[in-house]
Amino acid sequence: MSAMKDVGTVPVTARVAYGTRCELRELLKRERMRRAALMADPQWGTQRLSRGFAAEVRAAWRQKLAVMRNDGELLDTLDAVVTFGVRQELTERGWDHPWPPYPPKARNTGRWPGAKQGGYPEKLAFRLLASLENQVRAACWHTSASAIRELHDWHERHRLMLSKRRCSPTGLDDALEMYGRLAAKVTTTGTIWRAGVRTGLLLQPNF
């Protein structure tokens, strides 16, 4: 992938449910066939055109593809599927607006407190606009910051208890129940990537 194509985008890796990759392959296969049918329209033909006119036609076709992908009318690449789905997810959550900057710790490579483990055996790698990735990360952080602070406090209070089990079964159950309530208030970026993929699959064009 050329550096020019990557300007303004960042790589993202998401863990997704089993079977997601298969569903995506089927969607992309159908959408690429539809793209080929659209491109076969005579208006995009460049035979018998001068070099200059042919370049203009190709540029217009690339612009049309970009608009269709942006509007969710053509989801022929994984990046297009996820971008469309993530934007829809942000809109549904009311998060499609500017957010304050997030702290550096929001981009560390470890798990956020409250992140769920397991259940997502497949991995997807794609690219998103840096502005969209930042918007998602900022939205997740600022809507989860209070719960994350409480989870840090929870760990500090219960670290010894959990490591040595120095509590009654009832006390442990109460502590874990509290952890579950706090963790449910945390929305990780992985949650949004998975929701975006699912939304992109469910809202696929039907022409």
Image (cartoon, helix red, strand yellow):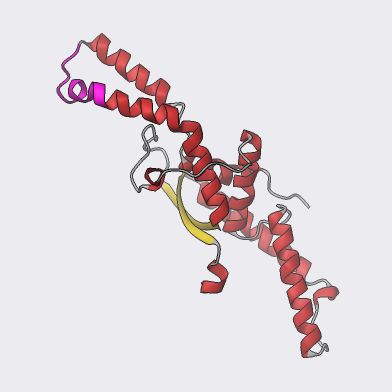
User: What residue appears at the point 68 percent right and 48 percent down from the top-left corner?
Assistant: 204
Q: Position of residue 122 (x, y in %)?
A: 43, 48
Residue bounds of the magenta highlight: 156-167
Magenta-drawn stretch contains 86:
no
Residue 53: % across, % down: 81, 84
Report the front residue among 32 and 67.
Answer: 67
Q: Position of residue 50 (x, y in %)?
A: 81, 90
State the residue at coordinates (74%, 54%): 73
Depicted 76 relative to depicted 170: above or below: below
Identify which residue is drawn at 80% across, 79% down: 45
The answer to whether residue 17 shows anywhere in this view is no
What is the count of numbered marks? 0
| 29 left or right of 115 in image | right
Q: Is residue 9 something one can see in this rendering? A: yes
Residue 28, image x, y percentages: 62, 58
Residue nearest the observer in this picture, 22 or 196: 196
At x 61%, y 40%, the residue is 90
Q: Is residue 160 magenta?
A: yes
Nearer to us in this view, 62 or 102: 102
What secondary structure do most residues of the magenta stretch adopt?
A: helix
Q: Which residue occupies the extreme front position in the image?
A: 100
Does 163 sit left or right of 120 as displayed? left
Foreground of the two, 185 or 24? 185
Q: Height in image: 194 above or below 48?
A: above
Left or right of 7, for residue 167: left
Q: Quadrant of residue 150?
A: top left
Q: Is residue 171 above or below residue 164?
A: above
Q: Quadrant of residue 175?
A: top left
Q: In screen coordinates, is 197 left or right of 17?
A: right
